[in-house]
Every structure is written in structure tokens, then in C-alpha cells.
Amino acid sequence: MNQSRDISREIRRLGVPALGALAADPLISLVDTAFVGRLGATHLGALGVATSIFTLMFVTFNFLAYGTTSLVAQRIGAGRRESAAQIVGQGVFLALVIGVVGLAVVESATGSLLGLMQAGDDVLEVATPYLRIRALAIPAVLLITVGHGAFRGFQDTVTPLVVTIGLNLINLILDPILIFGLDWGIRGAAVATVIAQWVGAIWFLTLMVRSNWGVVWRPPSWRELRPFLNVGGALSIRTLSLVAVLTLATATAASIGTEEVAAHQVVSQWMLFLALVVDALAIAAQAMIGRFVGADDLEAARLTARRLLIWGWWIGLTLGVLILVGRGAIAGWFSGDDTVRELTGSAMLILAVIQPIGALVFVGDGLYLGAGAFRFLAGATVTASAITAILLLLTPRIDWGLNGVWWSIAVLIAVRGLAFVVRYGRRSSIA
């Protein structure tokens, strides 16, 4: 009983600050959107186009956070702090290398990248300088990503929360000064973001240097990097398959009609927002399971997994009920069009139904990431994404409408959940 209470207390200790950091993380984009929106539709469109490019790039390399957390936590659990510190150093090195390469690619191919977005000439003219300036923050963002992963691996989710809030405050202060005060327009938004994110990166690096971790600040050998790169490859495949199928879902909704894609956008944003709540549990799962697996304490890992899954189920069920009750009001908040409201309410019903299973899948992600089952996660996600892609391609032909899109997303979640359950039952643990 005492161990159960201790585990619940630790879940709260790690999960609550993680939720705060997750909630604060999108604020830079939201603040930029709020201020740039006052410049006009063209500037807002340019911001959206450029942000989409950055989002795809950063999602591709989010293994720097997930991989660092899992590898560090496992080594901490095994009592190998020196090895954990080496992982942090390797992550910082990879972030710098990938960041510099990414910066060079974006700066040299700005026109081509924006051309792929198929925006109008007026939008491209405004987006080009913004993209070039914002690209200067690519190494900083990847360093911040490693910082999040490193502190989570060392069982500290408070520090990432503090840094995230701090850099968001800097951006909030600089945006109006640079955009309107100095009359730099959208360029001012880009400069404010670059400054804020480099402050965040330097802040994380300073904290790492001052810590007692003993990080080795030298370029790692290829042999030392190989485990990190293997993790990165598997996690990148997992993430890209998810991004691809969700992008296909949006494209499918757009092919059905304007009202359908408008309603799809509303429901998608709600799905992402609600995912933040459960993702806090996933972060706690990753850190705790990684530590227990590293310590070869499988009984504690099983108990933690069960407790996290129970919490995930009840949170998912609660969110589902809230959506079910409030879906009509939610639809009305985002559109005055009767058709869009009706379509939104109908799709929100499906979102409500899949919330409990979706919450379990999110927690399961954290469990298997913590256990180091990266290839399993990649395989399960690719399989689920392929099945979902087939259903999405069939949706317009069979005239399933927007509900067909969202039932396809439900299948994506259900297949991933089934894969998790089969492995969990077969191995009697998450390890």
C-alpha cells in the first residue's frame, strides 16, 4: 500500500509540472498569431505557411526529447549516472549538428520550401523574410528539446516548466515592441521568437553545466552515437507516419467540402488540446518506467504501469463525457455557419467516444518509450497508419463524409491500442 501511495505521489510530482510545460509550449505560436493577426490576413497567412514548415521539421526531430528522456532515465535507474550524463552530451551534440544543417537547408531553399505550400504571391512575399529570420532559431529549438528530455530523464519536470514560461514571457514582451513599437511588422515577430528561443537554449545549457550530472562536453564517437541514432530512426518513423496520416485526414476532409474541412479543423484542434492533458501522464510514465526498467525493478514498473493506465482511463472517460455534454456549445463557439456547427457536433461525438481508448494509447506510448521499445512503437504506428490511410482514401469514394474521416482516426487509435494490449499481455509487463 505504501509503495502504491508513493507511486501515485511521484506521478503527480512529475505529471503536474509536465502538464504546465506542455500547456505553455504552444504559447509562442499563439502569441505571434495574436499580434501578427492585427497586421492583416496576408501577414497571418504568411505566418501560418512558415509555421507549418517549422512544425514539420521539429516534429521530425522530437526524438531528441523522447530518446534523451528514455535513455537517461534507464541509466539513472541502473545507477549509471556517468553514462546518463554522456547521453545528455550526445543529445546536445546532435541538436547542434542537426540544427546547423537545418538552418543551412532552410536559408538556401527558402523559396522552394515556401513554393511547396502553394500559397499566393502576396503571402510568399511576406513569408520569405519571416522564414529566413526564424530559421536562425532552429539550433536553439533543438537544444531546448534536448533540455526537456534531459531534465525529464533525471526525474525533474519543474525545470522545463520554468524555462518554458520564461522564454514565453520574453516573447510576449518583445512581440509588441518589435512588431508595432519599432514598426518591424512580421519581421519583428520572427526576431522576438529567435531571441526568446536562444535565451531558452542558453538557459538550459547553463543549468546543465551547473548541475552535478557531470556532462561530457566533447563530440562523441560514431560508436557512442549509434544507440541514440537507432532510437532516433525508430521514433522518427513513428512520428512521421502519424503526421502523414493526420495530414491525409485533413486533405480528405478538404476534398469532401469547405464546410467539412472547417469543421475538421475545429475538432482536430480540440483533439490536440485534450491530448496535452494525457500527455503529461505519458511524460511521467516515460521517466518512471525508464528508471524502474534501468534498475531491473520490474515489479515497480508493473505497478506503475497499472496505476498510470487506470489514471489514463478515468481521465479519458471524464474528457469524453465533457465533450459529449458540451459538443453543441463548442461547435457554436467556433462557427456561425449552421452546416459547420452540425458537422462539428457530429464529429465531436466520435471524438468523445474515442477519448478513453485514446488516453490509454497516450499513456501506453509513454510506458513503451520508457521501456525502450522504440522499434515496437514504430511498427505498431506504421501498421495502424497504413490501415487508416486506406480507410481515408476510401472515404470520399464511398461517400462516408466527415464522420468517415473521424471513424478512420478512431481506427488509428484502436489499432495502436490493440497492439499495445497484445504486447502487454504477452510479456506480462511493459518491458
Image: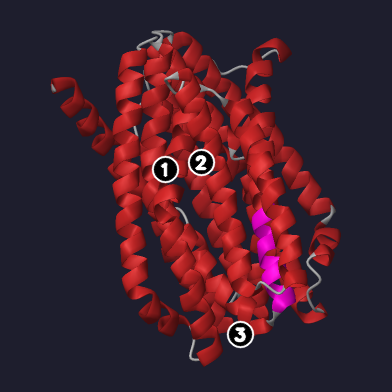
Label 3 vs 2, first from the N-terminus = 3
Left or right of residue 51: residue 418: left
Check disc 2 and report its element: helix, strand or loop.
helix
Three-letter code for the amino acid on which mark 3 is drawn: Gly
Give the crowd class for mark 2: few <14, some 14-19, many >=20 residues within 10 Å: many
Q: For residue 120, which quarter of the picture?
A: bottom right
Left or right of residue 324: residue 264: right
Q: Which mark is residue 68?
A: none
Three-letter code for the amino acid on which mark 2 is drawn: Gly
Check disc 3 and report its element: helix, strand or loop.
loop
Instruction: Give x and y (percent) for residue 176.
Output: 47, 73
Q: Residue 249 magenta-drawn? A: yes
**Residue 55 versus residue 307 in the image, above or below:** below
Three-letter code for the amino acid on which mark 1 is drawn: Leu
Q: How many marks?
A: 3
Task: Inspect this view and state whether residue 314 appears.
Answer: yes
Check disc 1 and report its element: helix, strand or loop.
helix
Left or right of residue 328: residue 57: right
| Residue segment shown in magenta | 245-256
Q: For residue 172, which quarter of the picture?
A: bottom left
Q: CA distance from mark 1 to mark 2?
A: 7 Å
Question: Which residue is label 1 attached to?
Answer: 360
User: Pointer 1 and pointer 2: residues touching (CB < 8 Å)?
Assistant: yes
Label 1 vs 2, first from the N-terminus = 1
The residue that appears at 77% across and 52% down in the rendered structure is 106
Task: Inspect this view and state whether residue 214 appears.
Answer: no
Q: Residue 423 magenta-drawn? A: no
Q: CA distance from mark 3 to mark 2?
A: 43 Å
User: Pointer 1 and pointer 3: residues touching (CB < 8 Å)?
Assistant: no
**Residue 431 versus residue 412 in the image, above or below:** above
Question: Which residue is label 3 attached to?
Answer: 40
